Image (cartoon, rainbow, N blue to C red):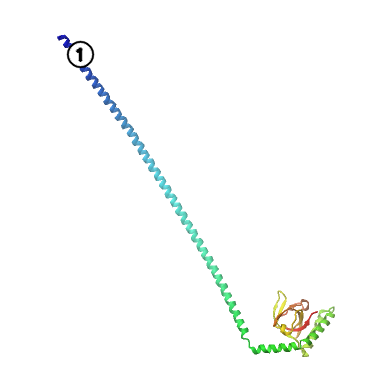
Amino acid sequence: MIASADRFLLKGAFMANTGSAFFTAKQRTVSGLAILFLLAAAFFGFLNSQKMKALRTNTANAIAARDAAERREAHEKLNAAAGGTTGAEERATKVEAELAQVQKEKADLQAKLDANQQEMASLQKRVGEAPSADLQAQVDDLRRQLDSAEKEKAFLAQKIQDAQEHASQPKETKKRRENAVAHREITSGRTGVRGTVLAYNQAYNFVVLNLGARNGVETNSEMLVLRDGTLIGKIRISSVEPATAIGDIITNSLERGVQVQPGDTVIYAGTSP
């Protein structure tokens, strides 16, 4: 009995020692694993912190580069806008100068137009204020000329016919004969319808006379042109108004270098056949 009890006690003590050792070994293993996990966590934490630091650095650099690019772009746009503004100002200055020149030319033209209108008004006023006595005297004189027109017409028609018959003769001889006839007519007192050249148009070779339908002037009639009593040429009436007439100069009736002038005298010769 006593021996059995001792073996039991010894076995229990051995079992107790064995379990205590196993527990101690297991506790050490767990502690070691915990330390390993802590070390691994610390290592990965260090790596993550380095990556985060690098990421922050890269992000900061990217932001700085972006800001620099934006500032550079804004600066370029500002310079471009400033250059555009300068060009626009120059164009505006040029346009203003051109506008001022146009306005000046317009003002000059308006001044000339006003001056012409004033001159026309002055001439119209002078015509309107012409003495009625002078007009009546002119009317009476025209009537006297009309009375002798038929006689003058016949005489001059005969003279023209005579000149045509002798057209083969030298022009100087014909001119002298016509001058002599015209001179005899003037000095003999056989005055017919007489007038004055008011204007001469060299470009179209016609004259304006102070005679018209009221004086018996007819279209296609011919008139002699005298200067200082000397015959210098002929005209053919192309248009007749009540108080004025237009006559085309018969070119071959003028001497070379001779031109009809305002103030020359005209004598009614008659109607051409």
Amino acid type, residue under disc 1 in the picture: Lys
- Residue 139 position, x and y percent, is 69, 88
Q: Is residue 103 in view?
A: yes
Task: Please determine whether, in this image, residue 116 is positioned above or below residue 152.
Answer: above
| Residue at figure coordinates x 61%, y 79% from the top left | 120
Task: Please determine whether, in this image, residue 90 is positioned above or below residue 165.
Answer: above
Q: Nearer the viewer, residue 101 or 33?
A: 33
Say few, some or many: other residues with alpha carbon within 10 Å of mark 1 (under 14 / 14 to 19 / 20 or more): few
Quadrant in which the C terminus is drawn: bottom right
- Residue 131 position, x and y percent, is 63, 88
Q: Nearer the viewer, residue 85 or 244?
A: 244
In the picture, measured across the screen, residue 53 lies left or right of residue 95, that is left
- Residue 93 position, x and y percent, is 50, 63
Residue 32 figure quarter? top left
> Which residue sits furthest front?
1
Residue 149 figure quarter? bottom right
- Residue 56 position, x and y percent, is 36, 40
| Residue at figure coordinates x 35%, y 36% from the top left | 50
In the picture, measured across the screen, residue 204 lies left or right of residue 87, that is right
| Residue at figure coordinates x 33%, y 34% from the top left | 46
Q: Is residue 173 in view?
A: no
Quadrant in which the N terminus is drawn: top left
Q: Secondary structure at mark 1?
A: helix
| Residue at figure coordinates x 39%, y 45% from the top left | 64
Residue under label 1, please give it: 11
In the picture, measured across the screen, residue 218 lies left or right of residue 100, that is right
Residue 3 figure quarter? top left
